[in-house]
Amino acid sequence: MDYLRVFGENVRLRRLHLGLTQEQLSERADLHRTYIGAIERGDRNVSLKNIVVIGQALNIKPYELLLFPDEKK
């Protein structure tokens, strides 16, 4: 699994854990909803700035969104 897919899956799982829609997350992060969808599908190469912004919007440390499933606690 590549980092784009890992990041996207981690964003999606955290968003669902918080009970947020893609639209609610996009509002929190001040990003477009379709951009969030593309990230979750692993279709977008996300900038470091947006990784930090999304982490803040999801109340999680940005590096945690880059962890492969077997690296999580």
Image (cartoon, helix red, strand yellow):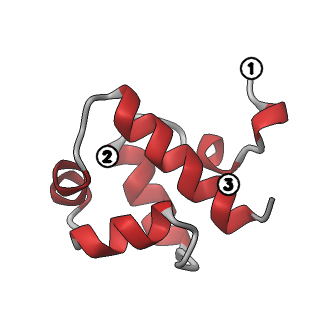
Q: Which numbered disc covers residue 6?
A: 3
Left/right of residue 39 with respect to residue 71 in the rendered view: left
Q: Which residue type carries mark 1?
A: Lys
| Screen quadrant of the N terminus | bottom right
Q: Residues within 10 Å of mark 3 (few under 14, many from 20)?
A: many
Distance (Cα) linking label 2 and label 1: 21 Å
Q: Which residue type carries mark 2?
A: Ala
**Considering depth in this image, is 48 or 58 the residue closer to the camera?**
58
Q: Residues within 10 Å of mark 2 (few under 14, many from 20)?
A: some
Q: Residue furthest top?
A: 73
Distance (Cα) linking label 1 and label 3: 15 Å
What residue did someone put label 2 on?
A: 57
Image location of residue 12, percent across then percent down: 45, 46
Q: Which residue type carries mark 3?
A: Val
Q: Secondary structure at mark 3?
A: helix
> Badges 1 and 3: C-beta atoms under 8 Å apart?
no
Distance (Cα) linking label 2 and label 3: 18 Å
Closer to the N terminus: mark 1 or mark 3? 3
Left/right of residue 2 with respect to residue 40 in the rendered view: right
Q: Residue at x 54, y 77 (%)?
A: 43
Image location of residue 61, percent across then percent down: 54, 39
Q: Is residue 22 above or below residue 58?
A: below
| Screen quadrant of the C terminus | top right
**Considering depth in this image, is 2 or 28 the residue closer to the camera?**
2
What residue did someone put label 1 on?
A: 73
Q: Residues within 10 Å of mark 1 (few under 14, many from 20)?
A: few
Closer to the N terminus: mark 2 or mark 3? 3
Q: Residue at x 17, y 56 (%)?
A: 23
**Considering depth in this image, is 16 or 62 the residue closer to the camera?**
16
Q: Residue at x 48, y 48 (%)?
A: 11
